[in-house]
C-alpha cells in the first residue's frame, strides 16, 4: 500500500496572479500487467485467470468435510438414559436444519484449478519455458529457461565471482562442528545440536527480473538457510545484541512506512541545511578559508551581522 506524501512547499507558497502559465499534466505512471509473457506459448482464459492471481494465491484442491465430527464421544453418558434418545433426535434435527440454511457467502469453482495447473506445467515443459517473479510489483514473467540461465551466468561473470570446481560444503560442515565442540563456554554440550545443520547444502541463487530496466537484468536473491553456518550465525547475532546493544538511531529506517511517517512529521519551518559541527578549539586556517559555521548562511546575509551575534541555520 502506497501513501501519497503531500508537497509541503507547494501548499505553503501563494500563487502569483501575474503569471498564468498553463501547467502540464503529470506523466502517467506505467504499471506492468500481472502476467508478462515473453514466449510464444499461448494460454487459455482459465489458465491466464489462474496466473493473474499471483504466486501467493492459495489453491484449494480438496473440499471440506461437511459432516460434523464429535470431539467428545463420551458426552452421551452424561445424559440420563430415558432422555438420551430424545436429545439425540433434537440434535440431529438441529444439525440438519443448520446444514440446509448454512450457505457460504462466497464460493469459488476449484474444479478447473488442478486441471489448469497441469496444463500450464505441460506447456512450459514442452516449450522449454519457466515462470519467474518480477523485481518490482507482483508480476509474473514467463520466459525461456535458457534466457533465464544466461541472465544468471551474465550476472556471475560481470560481478567477478570466483567459481570452484569442488563443493566445499562438507569441509565447511566439519569446521563448523569443530567450532561448536570447542566452544563449550558459549554453547553447552546438551544444546549444540540446535546449531548444527544436519543436511547442509550450498546456497542457491534466484534471479528477480527487473522489468523497469533495459535488457531486463536480474536482482539476486540468495537462500542461505541450507548453509552449514547459518544457525551458528544466528546464535552469534543474538549474543552480540545482548553484549553490545545498539541505541535506537533516528537515522535508521525499518521499512517504507517508517520513512513516510518520519517525512510527514517534519515541521513546515524546519531548516534545510544540517547543523554544523562546532569545534571547541579553532583550527588554524588560511586567511581565505571560511569558517564551517558560515556555510549555513549566504554571504550577503552576513554583512549586517555583528561579531558576537549568533548565526542560525
Image (cartoon, rainbow, N blue to C red):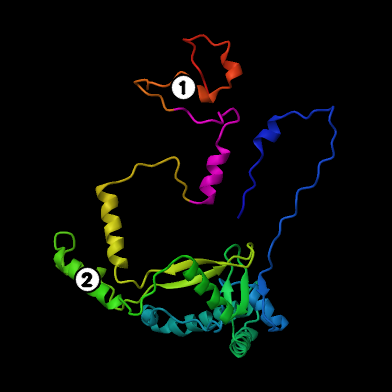
Image quadrant in which you'd find residue 114: bottom right
Local packing at callout 1 (Cα closer than 10 Å; few below 14, some 14-19, many 20+) is few
Residue at image x 26%, y 72%?
172
Which one is nearer the viewer's eye here, 136 or 149?
149
In the image, which is nearer the foreground, mark 2 or mark 1?
1
Height in image: 309 above or below 41? above
User: Would residue 43 be found to the left or right of residue 283 on screen?
Assistant: right
Quarter the N terminus occupies: bottom right
| Residue in the picture at 40% in, 24% down | 278
Which residue is drawn at the image coordinates 50% and 81% (left, top)? 68
Q: Where is residue 156 in the image (x, y as percent from the top left)?
A: 47, 70
Q: Looking at the image, can residue 149 be seen?
A: yes
C-beta proximity under 8 Å, tags 2 and 1:
no
Q: What element carries label 2?
A: helix
The magenta span reads: 255-276
Q: Nearer the viewer, residue 87 or 20?
A: 20
Name the residue carrying label 2. 175
Determine which of the numbered discs, if any, sits on residue 291 in the image.
Answer: 1
Residue 259 shown in magenta: yes
Amino acid at each position: 500500500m502506497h501513501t501519497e506524501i503531500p508537497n509541503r512547499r507547494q501548499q505553503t507558497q501563494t500563487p502569483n496572479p501575474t503569471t498564468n502559465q498553463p501547467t502540464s499534466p503529470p506523466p502517467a505512471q506505467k504499471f506492468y500487467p500481472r502476467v508478462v509473457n515473453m514466449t510464444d506459448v499461448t494460454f487459455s482464459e482459465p489458465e491466464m485467470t489462474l496466473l493473474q492471481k499471483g504466486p501467493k494465491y492459495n489453491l484449494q484442491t480438496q473440499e471440506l468435510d461437511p459432516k460434523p465430527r464429535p470431539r467428545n464421544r463420551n458426552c452421551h453418558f452424561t445424559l440420563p438414559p430415558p432422555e438420551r434418545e430424545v436429545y439425540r433426535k433434537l440434535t440431529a434435527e438441529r444439525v440438519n436444519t443448520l446444514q440446509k440454511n448454512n450457505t457460504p457467502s462466497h464460493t469459488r469453482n476449484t474444479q478447473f484449478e488442478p486441471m489448469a495447473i497441469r496444463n500450464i506445467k505441460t506447456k512450459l515443459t514442452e516449450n522449454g519455458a519457466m515462470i519467474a517473479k518480477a523485481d518490482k510489483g507482483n508480476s509474473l514473467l514467463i520466459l525461456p529457461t535458457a534466457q533465464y540461465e544466461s541472465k544468471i551466468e551474465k550476472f556471475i561473470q560481470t560481478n567477478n565471482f570466483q567459481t570452484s570446481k569442488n563443493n566445499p560444503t562438507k569441509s565447511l560442515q566439519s569446521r563448523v562442528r569443530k567450532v561448536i565442540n570447542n566452544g563449550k563456554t558459549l554453547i553447552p554440550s546438551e544444546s549444540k545440536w540446535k546449531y548444527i545443520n544436519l543436511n547442509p547444502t550450498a546456497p542457491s541463487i534466484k534471479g528477480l527480473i527487473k522489468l523497469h530496466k533495459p535488457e531486463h537484468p536480474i536482482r539476486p536473491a540468495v537462500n542461505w538457510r541450507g548453509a552449514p553456518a547459518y544457525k551458528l550465525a544466528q546464535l552469534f547475532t543474538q549474543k552480540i545484541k545482548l553484549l553490545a546493544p545498539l541505541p535506537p538511531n533516528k537515522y535508521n529506517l525499518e521499512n517504507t512506512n517508517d520513512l513516510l511517517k518520519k517525512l510527514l512529521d517534519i515541521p513546515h519551518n524546519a531548516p534545510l541545511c544540517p547543523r554544523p559541527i562546532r569545534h571547541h578549539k579553532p583550527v588554524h586556517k588560511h586567511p581565505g578559508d571560511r569558517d564551517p559555521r558560515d556555510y549555513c548562511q549566504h554571504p550577503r546575509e552576513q554583512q549586517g551581522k555583528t561579531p558576537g551575534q549568533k548565526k542560525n541555520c
